[in-house]
Amino acid sequence: MKIVYLDCFSGISGDMFLGALLDAGLPLDRLKEGLSSLPLEGYRIEARREARRQIFGTRFLVAVEETAHVHRDLGLIRGLIEQSNLPKTVKERSCRVFESLAQVEGAIHGQPPEEVHFHEVGAVDSIVDIVGTLYGLECLHVEKVYASSLPMGSGFTPSAHGNLPVPAPATLALLKGVPLLEGGSRHELVTPTGAALIRHLANSFGPMPPMVIDAIGYGAGSRDLPDRPNLLRVLIGRDTALAATETVVVLETAVDDSNPEWLGFLMERLLTAGALDVAFLPIQMKKGRPAVQIQVIGRPEQADLLMAIVMAETTTLGIRFRYSQRRVRQRSVAEVETPWGKIRVKTVMQEEGPPILAPEYEACREIALTHHIPLREVYGWIAGLSAEALRPAP
């Protein structure tokens, strides 16, 4: 699996991210060709080698004509992206990044997301940075992105709304649940564009994952910092771990006066909303009252949604939450031929020996009901298969 690790020792911005990808081997001509299908005019892009504290990297620049500066809303930006000939995955990811920006900007300024008029991030250079970064990762065939903790600057930064505190309000809103560090710098180290990209892309934040490095790139920022090289370091390589580390949010609450039928419905709603796991544990509360502890595990960006569901469907008055790391074994979906037709199975990698085959319950259940055979017979037949019987699922 091809992965990227973002070493954000001086923060991150959209142009630094794209510069680092170019420095690591992304062809500039291919980037220009992909971006040329966006219906945008009045700009040109270039990349040049520049040094920051005697370390050279690639500076990505977008030169924009004065007439090209337009304030755009979410609908207009989404339309520009959808009209392009970029790959479908790049279009979808780009739209999601701008939607997340619109949501936080709308919350900050008291507007619905669709009515937010972007200033800095709606400009041509920011659109090129975001779409170009996602297209660059697609061209490099990157499957997963990991990142270090993010150093945050301080002070003030100019904007269309006047001077804003650093980190900018939109940046902080985008980084809820992400590990942050005091950067010790009176400069903006993480921009809203950089925050939106890394929040959308990173599977987890922390130390570098086990990997074989194939390429290293440095993306140069626009200014020289007094205490460090203003660079984003990107490591591109192959994942060597059979178990990946990712960040999750863990929600917990306890109820002693909830209808058991409500809890069943709660679990159904949470799993439908995308929760990774839901568990109910019997506990004893004060005064000896029997109760149920509800534990929900989800993606960090799902925290608010999952908490809202728990609040709505239970009698709880509060929810504890924390962000945690978990190790997940590498797995994939494959298809096998059985006496009852094709069936999808999960393959789980092991440190030694062939992969473990894990049947999908619903698929096995359907076969058992259709062919009037015991469920355990279907499971037993699949358990006896060898890895050679597997083929990738369509």
Image (spheres, helix red, strand yellow):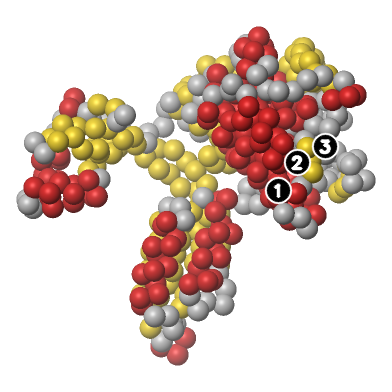
Q: Position of residue 302 (x, y in %)?
A: 54, 54
Q: Position of residue 115 (x, y in %)?
A: 75, 49
Estimate the spatial distance between the alpha carbons at disc 1 and disc 3, rounded to whole Å.
13 Å
* Classed neighbour count for the residue bearing mark 2: other residues with Cα under 10 Å, few (<14), some (14–19), many (≥20): some
In the image shown, does 311 or 237 lie closer to the viewer?
311
Q: Are marks 3 and 2 in contact (CB under 8 Å)?
A: yes
The vertical placement of 114 against 56, above or below, is below
Q: Is residue 224 visible?
A: no
**Which residue occupies the extreme bottom position in the image?**
287
Q: Are marks 2 and 1 in contact (CB under 8 Å)?
A: yes
Q: Position of residue 352 (x, y in %)?
A: 26, 31
In the image shown, does 9 or 294 lie closer to the viewer?
294
In which quadrant will I find the N terminus?
top left
The amino acid type found where label 2 is placed reads Asp
User: Residue 114's mark?
Assistant: 1
User: Residue 140's mark?
Assistant: none
Q: Earlier in the sequence, mark 1 or mark 3?
A: 3
Estimate the spatial distance between the alpha carbons at disc 3 and disc 2, rounded to whole Å.
7 Å
In which quadrant will I find the C terminus?
top left
Quickly name the residue at label 3. Answer: 71
Q: Secondary structure at mark 1?
A: helix
Answer left or right for 106 relative to 94.
right
Query: Which image quadrant for residue 275?
Result: bottom left
The amino acid type found where label 3 is placed reads His
Question: Image point 41% across, 87% down: which residue?
Answer: 289
Question: Image point 80% across, 54% down: which residue?
Answer: 109
The amino acid type found where label 1 is placed reads Glu
Quickly name the residue at label 2. Answer: 73
